Image (spheres, helix red, strand yellow):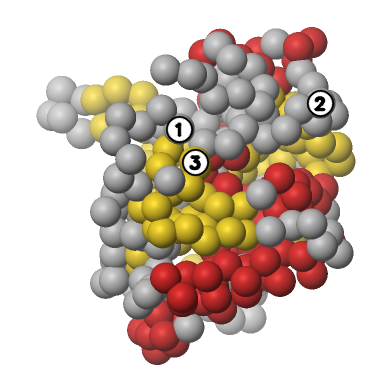
Amino acid sequence: MSKVTGVKSVDFKITAYGYGVVNWNGPTDLEIIIDNKSKKVTNHSMPKLRGYTNIRGYWDDGKPQFKRPEEVDFSKTPLYISQNCIRHHLFKDEAINLQTKDLLEHIINHMDNFLCSITALVRGYVIPSKEFKRTSPLLLTDFEEVKMMGNFEQLGNSGSKDKKETKTGKEASTAIFSKTTFGDTSYEGYGSISIEQLQFISLSADYGREAMKIDNHKDGAKLAETLTSYIQNMLGNKQAKAEYHQNYVRQGAIFTHGEAGILLNEEAIDTLVEITLDLFRNLVIKQAKGYMYVDSIKVDYNDGSTAKDMMRIKHSPMNVAPQKNSQYAVYFKAV
């Protein structure tokens, strides 16, 4: 069996800077010491911390013992921005809620238009009611904070004019709460664009990855023309092409029974890769009294042929190829 050769993935490392917390985890049960006694509190706001648990242990009766907020070790449980948050802001210009019934029905009736979008081509989607699926070619890690300069802050809202009441009916004019906060932040994250998943769009249900349904091969060819026009207009590369065939077979397959679909050529892949990298270069998140912006991105056009070459930009940065020195790998052929 001959090996597939060429650039198999475009991997990248991102360095980002910011201030404050972008991705909060919500209220967390903790304990504080008052008059030398441990007291449970539920009004501490905690950001997303990798691997953090607020439980220290358990009492004899099985009830949990909670940690104190000042006990957080940021070297062991660092702050991070989840990859879901990153994806949301990365593709927010094409924000689509597939859970909205009327919108989903409209998308299903106009799948050809939906497919001509960065959201469909790169972010991916699943429409369970029709079993339509486009697996995202974009692998993304959480952005992990590396300065580890978190703070515990005790805050209060006070007032003498409006005497509010607590849940027990007692008068309360002061509310004490606390937060784990951050000042200046620095993040590192990694991503990878799979060429195999990017270059092929299945239009057949045979392998459980049908992107949309076509009624005949003429419709498939028309869809390829529409997609070609869309990709060409992105960066003005008229060599970009999406080609339909009724039987694409993966390289190395035992049998020649394949699936109808669309295959993107070298220039079309180049266009989508550059657009995706540009989205990261211009990524800014501003929310929850904090912000984050991407400062730099290092790219590896990974044409490695061994398993250990996967994400080498992370473990062997000296071996990366910052420029594309060979063509993209072609995983499918028309038979």
Vertical placement of 67 versus 42: above or below? above
Residue type marked 2: Asn
First along the sequence among labels 1 and 2: 1
In the current view of this chain or complex, which residue is farthest to the front? 335
Residue visible at 73% across and 33% down in the picture: 327
Image mark for residue 332: 3
Residue placed under numbered mark 2 in the picture: 325
Q: CA distance from mark 1 to mark 2?
A: 22 Å
Label 3 crowd (10 A; few <14 / some 14-19 / many >=20): some
Task: Say left or right for 175 vs 273.
Answer: left
Q: Which mark is residue 251?
A: 1
Residue drawn at (76%, 18%) of the image: 320
- The residue under label 1 is which amino acid type? Gln
Q: Are marks 3 and 1 in contact (CB under 8 Å)?
A: yes
Using the image as rendered, state which of residue 202 and residue 252 is in the foreground: 252
Q: Amino acid at mark 3?
A: Phe
From mark 3 to mark 2, how far is it between C-alphas?
21 Å
Report the disc number at residue 92. Answer: none
Q: In the image as oriented, which residue stretches furthest toward the left?
A: 61
Could you tell whether 43 is left or right of 183 in the image? left
In the picture, the quarter occupied by the N terminus is top left
**136 or 95, which is in the foreground?**
136
Dot 1 alpha-carbon crowd within 10 angstroms: few under 14, some 14 to 19, many 20 or more: some
Q: For mark 1, give the secondary structure.
A: loop
Give the x, y percent position of residue 132: 35, 65
Q: Earlier in the sequence, mark 3 or mark 1?
A: 1
109, above or below 260, in the image: below
